[in-house]
Image: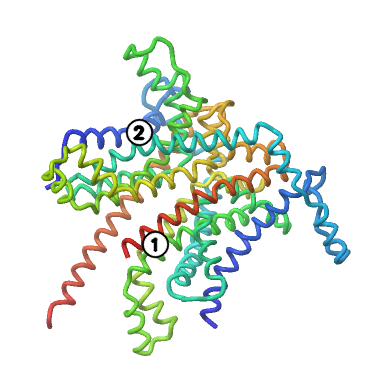
Amino acid sequence: MRRFSWFNATALTLGFAFLYIPMIILVIYSFNASKLVTVWAGFSTQWYGELVRNEEFLNAAWVTIKVAVMSSTIATVLGTMAAYVLVRAGRFGGRTLFSGMIYAPLVMPEVITGLSLLLLFIGIGLDRGVLTIVLAHTTFSMCYVSVVVSSRLVSFDKSLEEAALDLGCSPFEAFRLVTLPIIAPAVVSGWLLAFTLSLDDLVIASFTTGPSATTLPIKIFSAVRLGVSPEINALSTIMIAIVTIGVITASLVTKQAAVRQARDERMAERPA
Amino acid sequence: MRRFVLIAVPYLWLAALFLIPFAIVLKISLSDVALARPPYFPQLDLSTGWEGFTSFFAELDFENFWFLTTDDLYWKAYLSSLQIALTSTLMTLLVGYPIAYAMARAAPEWRPTLLMLVILPFWTSFLIRVYAWMGILSNEGLLNQFLLWLGVINEPLTILNTNTAVYIGIVYTYLPFMILPIYSALERMDDSLLEAAEDLGCSRLGAFWLVTVPLSKNGIIAGCFLVFIPTIGEFVIPSLLGGSGTLMIGKVLWEEFFSNRDWPVASAVAVILLLILVIPIILFQRNEQKQREAEG
């Protein structure tokens, strides 16, 4: 029995208050009637109305979603390949360099990644816009995907793959029929991680974008630099709501899947 | 053949979009700024053959790095980034450890929910979480209103646009990175060790210092690096919450590039920043490896 003292209760209460109160305040003030964010002047949803009518924000949101879907999808494919190579391909020339290139972007300051990619795009004369942001986001998020997927690959039983190969599967079939279903949860969470990283990124997008493509974080940053605005509060509230619903749904789904898997395993163990 | 393709595709992608860009940064950091497009000199001109190649290398020099040492701004920015990163890492540890500890001691059926509550802010936009503090910390902000109402202060405190606001922002946004590794170290801890320590005459505080803290050492180290490393190059927090007096190298690099359009100096700043980061990154990797070996 673990002791749960008043100290622990206080630590949790204060800790979660610190984590959540700023966001709750942000949400509350998005319903404020006053233009001044710090003065409460009654309930109103006018800022949401203004947001929906604001073409610039809508365009930026559309660009952001496009970039996030494309980059996270490519990053998931490349990251899963990279994870498979790291865990299963054994030795090959330049393996150390390869794993270094997978881990380095995780700790690289964004300003450096952004600067170096911009200099590359200018060097090869690529016009900056949606394409360059997608390339940049894919590059750093594939590393996150490969870390998530490889931790799953390490933990699962290799003999299942070998059994499939012995039973006449081609390596590709073995991957599709055995490996992929098992690592699927990791691949999905890798995609989600890549998607949110792309949605959230300000620094790398600012470096690699051109005048033709403004993403939502770039738009928000230039707006909030001038100070707090109720429209940004409304936008933030919408984004917080989407993330909260997404995370809760995802955790419920994985919980259900875990329960189902546990039941299946019990069934399989029962002698016929 | 398939194996070759499987290796080659991600390999080439990373080489082209991660490795080569660094080579370019390194090269430009050795060039001179020029009023041209692109704004640096020399350009590699292969049309003149070998001669163009050698004259290109002859033009490269360490002038920008020399410039960084002569202008106060840069080394002060590096030092102040290091100092801000170090202080805020310690502050995050002090705030995060009790939370992680309490989470690990909570009833097992509560732990997944608590864990999700820590992870949830991590999925929410970083920019929005920093922005949330702008409204709280400003002169007419809620914190000042609250303190004035309490009667603790008579005049609003200036917090926004100072280093204090930067510290608050860093602790707030990086807290999950500190809590999670410490929690996972503490959660695995065997409680009977604490009971044994107390049976052998340790006070509860003594048992905490002699048993709990050493057992969570790896989690503490991992958490500190996860906060320290990204904080050094941080840009969003100092530019939204910091003031003109807040010197951080990420912001300097950004301004050098976007406002001064001095690409060679910006590249040199990036190269030095990377050299500074190499040491903590290697230490971090070593710690991770040691932990993996201990578990495996």
- Check disc 1 and report its element: helix, strand or loop: helix
Out of A33 and A2, give the one closest to the viewer: A2
Q: Earlier in the sequence, mark 2 or mark 1?
A: 2
Residue B95 position (above or below residue B25) = above
- Residue designated by label 1: A188
**Residue at (24% x, 60% y) in the render:** A256
Out of A189 and B20, give the one closest to the viewer: B20
- Say if labels 2 and 1 share a chain: yes
Horizontal side, residue B236 vs residue B185: left or right: right
Mark 2 is on which residue type? Ile
Q: x and y percent of residue A197 in the render?
A: 48, 51
Residue A37 position (above or below residue B266) = above
Q: x and y percent of residue A82 in the render?
A: 49, 68
Residue A242 visible, this orientation: no
**Residue at (20% x, 42% y) in the render:** B207
Q: Quadrant of residue B288?
A: bottom left
Horizontal side, residue A210 vs residue A29: left or right: right
Mark 1 packing: few (<14 Cα in 10 Å), some, or many (20+)?
Answer: some
Mark 2 packing: few (<14 Cα in 10 Å), some, or many (20+)?
Answer: some
Q: x and y percent of residue B272 in the render?
A: 63, 46
